[in-house]
Image: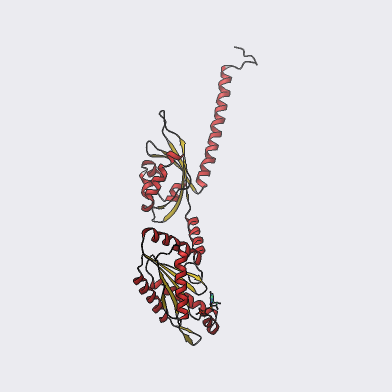
């Protein structure tokens, strides 16, 4: 049978279609190889979850290295994922995950996991609705989980630097007053006792002049240690000026506050310094104010400050209780 140039035969059409689909298959294969290598190289786990069946339907290869667990087990049972979440964070992780149904996307979601080898890691796990369920279709949630442990450590370090006095490792002035304000508001709201101690090193200029600035620094460090020893858990302690420290004692009635200030006074009196063969001691003056009808933290602080100056005027090395 003859075929015209204008109208290809059925065989030719079939051959062309076959060649075309072979090319398509080849292109798909190449694309899949690129996606696989991308998924293998990114340091993040991509996942897809069938909400109705409560089943993970896809997890990218990084899961095994990031979580230190088997992807096959996870695909078989979603509880594998839940089980690796650090117990204190489980409720938050489950609750924030459920919120995706309502909000469509949850981008700020961070929790800790315990890898199979026992390592604790921080995970950022963003999730998005990829397909809304209905008319026979399941609801599909997709997500991206990244290991942010190093970022968290860095944030912790930055927070420590921003809130700590480098010389004495106690809270710096800004951080002390920020925390003190929270405690003050709490005490006023619940009518619970609160005490403020202001402590100033006596004749510190002489210590610097007689023994050198480094000796002065050592004195400040040791006084900060006395503060840590004398105070209770939950008390705040900070260096709020050159040679001035403050303590805030939440829930502490006046009598107990006085005992704590006396313990601190004794701790400081017991300190002994020996530098280049010369030994010396140090004393402090303290002002102690217990919360009364102070309308603000500033007012409580001012009463402790006035008491401290009274202690200085009264001969130093003593505690004065505010009126
Ligand atoms: N070594 C050291 N000295 C400091 C630091 N910050 C402040 N000072 C010194 O602390 C001294 C404080 O002196 P004054 O304010 O006169 O107080 P004082 O000598 O303790 O006198 P009184 O408070 O009346 O007992 C000054 O000499 C400051 O230079 C510090 O970080 N290290």
Name the residue rendered at 46%, 68% in the picture: 301
**Is any atom of residue 60 visible in this view?**
no
Looking at the image, the residue that sits furthest to the top is: 1
Displayed quadrant of residue 284: bottom left
Image position, residue 109 (x, y; %): 45, 48
Displayed quadrant of residue 296: bottom left
Quarter holding the N terminus is top right
Image position, residue 74 (x, y; %): 39, 44
Image position, residue 162 (x, y; %): 51, 63
Name the residue rendered at 53%, 40% in the picture: 33
Q: Is residue 277 above or below residue 214?
A: below
Name the residue rendered at 37%, 53% in the picture: 88
Towards the viewer: 74 or 174:
174
Looking at the image, the residue that sits furthest to the bottom is: 277
**Is any atom of residue 154 visible in this view?**
yes
Towards the viewer: 62 or 88:
88
Displayed quadrant of residue 297: bottom left
Say how the picture is coloured: secondary structure
Image position, residue 198 (x, y; %): 45, 72
Left or right of 94, for residue 27: right
Number of numbered discs: 0
Q: Is residue 71 above or below residue 303?
A: above
Looking at the image, the residue that sits furthest to the right is: 5
Towards the viewer: 257 or 1:
257
Quarter holding the C terminus is bottom left
């Amino acid at each position: 049978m003859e075929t015209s140039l204008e109208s290809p035969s059925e065989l030719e059409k079939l051959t062309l279609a076959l060649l075309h689909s072979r090319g398509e298959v080849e292109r798909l294969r190449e694309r899949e190889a690129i996606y696989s290598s991308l998924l293998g190289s990114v340091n993040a786990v991509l996942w897809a979850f069938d909400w109705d069946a409560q089943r993970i339907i896809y997890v990218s290869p990084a899961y095994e290295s990031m979580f230190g667990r088997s992807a096959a087990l996870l695909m078989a049972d979603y509880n594998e994922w839940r089980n690796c979440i650090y117990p204190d964070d489980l409720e938050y992780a489950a609750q924030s995950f459920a919120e995706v149904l309502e909000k469509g996307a949850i981008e700020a979601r961070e929790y800790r996991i315990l890898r199979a080898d026992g390592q604790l890691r921080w995970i950022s796990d963003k999730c998005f609705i990829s397909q809304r369920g209905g008319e026979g279709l399941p609801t599909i949630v997709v997500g991206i989980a990244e290991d942010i442990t190093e970022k968290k450590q860095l944030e912790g370090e930055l927070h420590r630097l921003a809130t700590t006095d480098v010389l004495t490792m106690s809270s710096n002035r800004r951080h002390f007053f920020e925390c003190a304000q929270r405690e003050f508001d709490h005490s006023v709201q619940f009518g619970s006792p609160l005490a403020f101690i202001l402590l100033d090193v006596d004749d510190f200029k002489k210590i610097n002049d007689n023994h050198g600035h480094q000796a002065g620094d050592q004195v400040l460090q040791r006084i900060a240690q006395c503060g840590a020893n004398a105070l209770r858990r939950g008390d705040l302690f900070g260096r709020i000026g050159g040679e001035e420290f403050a303590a805030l004692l939440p829930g502490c009635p006046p009598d107990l506050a006085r005992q704590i200030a006396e313990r601190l006074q004794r701790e400081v009196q017991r300190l002994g310094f020996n530098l280049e063969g010369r030994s010396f001691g140090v004393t402090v003056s303290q002002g102690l104010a217990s919360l009364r009808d102070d309308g603000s933290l500033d007012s409580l602080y001012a009463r402790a400050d006035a008491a401290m100056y009274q202690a200085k005027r009264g001969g130093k090395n003593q505690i004065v209780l505010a009126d």
